[in-house]
Each structure stands twice: as C-alpha cells, then as structure tokens.
C-alpha cells in the first residue's frame, strides 16, 4: 500500500481547514459549506465525464483511483534476481523444471510468461503475446489517467459556472444591500470547490496512476526480456547483464555482488 496518496490528500485538506480557522475562527468553517455548490461541481464533473467516457469506464473510476493507493508492485532489483534464479534452474534442470515455480508466483503476467515458456512457445510468438499483453495494460492505464485528468480539467470550469449562477441570482436581489457580501461569498465557494477537487484529488491521482503504470510496464518489460533470454539458453550471468539496463547505476554493482554471494 502506498500511503503517500491518502497522507497527501488528508494533509492538504487539514492545512486548508487550518488556514480557514486561523483566518475566520471555527465559525468560519460554516461559510465554506454549501450543498448547492457541491452539487454543481461534483455533479457537473461526473456528468461531463459520462458524456466523454462509456458508463462502464466511469463506474470503474473508483477502482482506478484505488489502484494508485493499494497497488503493490515488486521492484526491478527483486525481478532481476528472480529472473537470474529462473535462469539457473533452467540451465541445471531444463525449461520444464520452471513449471514447479508457478505455485510460488503471484504475478499473473509472470505466471503466464513461464507457462508459455514451458509449453514450448517459439520465441517470436512468445514475444508477440507478451508485448501485446503489456500494450493492453498500458492502454487501460492510459484511459484511467485520461479520465482523472479530464475530471481535473472540468471541475474548475463547473466551479466557475456555479459562481456565475450565484452572481446572477445575487444580482436579481439587490433590494437588500446587506445581502450582497453574503451572496458574493456563496457564489465564490463553488469556484473554491472546483479548484480543490481538481488540484488536490483528480489531477494528482491521475499523475500517480501514470507513475504506477510506468513502473508496472517497466517490470513487465523486464520480465519479457528475462523470459526470452532464458528461452534462448543464456548463461545466468548473461541474463543478469541483459537485465541490468532496468536498474539504476547505483544498484547494478550491488546486485551483481549479491548474486555472487548467493552462489557461494
């Protein structure tokens, strides 16, 4: 679980609330609660998203958002080590011996890769199947990112729309000058909601989903190259060298020494 996303959101809301309380006291918080404004911003944002995306995609937006928080990914270092270990098994016992490792594998992509390998899939078909799988994952994540970014774009627009509605209603009732300030404040609240929803929820989560997507596809590409190298019968040390490109420079020497120690 990545706690940075919920911690960041909670911290943002708390700091904003604290600033409001410091400026207007606890009673000032009541001025920032306006149900019609919430309906305009949230309802308008959802409605615009429904116009742009199919219903099934929109109803799954919560699952997409949760993916940025609860997804648990491995690391390139761990996957390189895993591929080297598989290469050792394949070199000593043959490719069919890797089928015994399937029960230990929780990642569906890796399990599928091993199954294709032990089933005797030729290298061209193996690479084609796995590359298409990676592309499908990338495509699904791109849609989710686009949806969150779209919501982040339209939310401030509906906030401004709510402000215009509030101003029109206020200008129609100018008989009582004492109500002008209250009406103006209420009208501006909608813009506040739109900016808050966009910049503290939708756009950051879209960015986090994009980051998670890149991390996940990187691991899958590493797995693909590792499986192809194992199928080609490469020495475990060669497999390691091929996969080092996925590691940061500072991690490469450390990982190599770790494999040497493991062999002893």
Image: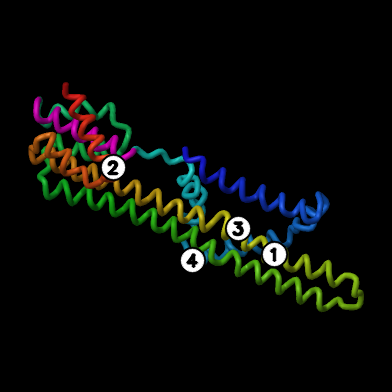
Q: Earlier in the sequence, mark 4 or mark 1?
A: 4
Tell me the residue at 91%/74% (across/down): 176
Q: Are marks 1 and 2 in contact (CB under 8 Å)?
A: no
Which residue corresponds to mark 3? 197
Distance Cα–Cα, label 2 vs label 4: 44 Å
Q: Is residue 24 magenta?
A: no
Residue 185 percent across, percent down from the top left:
78, 66
Magenta region, residue range: 75-92
The quarter of the picture where residue 31 lies is bottom right
Q: x%, y% of residue 149? A: 49, 61
Which is closer to the viewer, label 3 or label 2?
Answer: 2
Q: Secondary structure at mark 3?
A: helix
On screen, residue 165 above or below 150: below
Of circles 2 and 4, the one toward us is 2
Residues at marks 1 and 3 touching, judged by CB atoms closer than 8 Å: no
Separation of residues labelled 3 and 4 (CA atoms): 19 Å
Residue at coordinates 81% horizontally, 69% vertically from top-left? 183
Say which residue label 4 marks. Answer: 52
Earlier-in-chain disc, 1 versus 3: 1
User: Could you tell me what secondary structure mostly forms the magenta stretch?
Assistant: helix
In this image, 76 relative to 14: left or right?
Answer: left
Residue for badge 2: 250
Chain-order first, disc 1 or disc 2? 1
């Amino acid at each position: 679980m990545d706690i940075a996303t919920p911690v960041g959101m909670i911290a943002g809301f708390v700091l904003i609330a604290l600033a409001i309380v410091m400026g207007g006291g606890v009673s000032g918080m009541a001025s920032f609660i306006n149900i019609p404004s919430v309906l305009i911003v949230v309802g308008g944002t959802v409605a615009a998203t429904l116009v742009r995306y199919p219903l099934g995609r929109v109803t799954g937006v919560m699952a997409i958002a949760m993916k940025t928080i609860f997804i648990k990914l491995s690391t390139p270092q761990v996957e390189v080590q895993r591929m080297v270990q598989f290469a050792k098994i394949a070199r000593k016992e043959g490719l069919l011996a890797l089928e015994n490792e399937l029960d230990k594998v929780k990642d569906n992509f890796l399990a599928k890769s091993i199954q294709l390998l032990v089933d005797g899939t030729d290298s061209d078909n193996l690479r084609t199947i796995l590359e298409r799988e990676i592309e499908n994952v990338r495509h699904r994540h791109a849609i989710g990112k686009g949806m969150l970014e779209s919501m982040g774009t339209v939310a401030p627009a509906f906030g401004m729309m709510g402000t215009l509605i509030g101003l029109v209603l206020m200008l129609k009732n100018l008989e009582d000058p004492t109500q002008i300030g209250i009406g103006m404040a209420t009208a501006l609240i909608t813009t506040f909601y739109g900016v808050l929803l966009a910049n503290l929820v939708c756009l950051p989560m879209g960015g986090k989903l994009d980051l998670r997507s890149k991390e996940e596809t990187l691991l899958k590409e590493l797995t693909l190259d590792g499986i192809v190298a194992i199928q080609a019968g490469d020495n475990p040390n060669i497999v390691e060298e091929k996969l080092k490109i996925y590691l940061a420079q500072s991690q490469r020497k450390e990982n190599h020494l770790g494999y040497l120690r493991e062999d002893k």
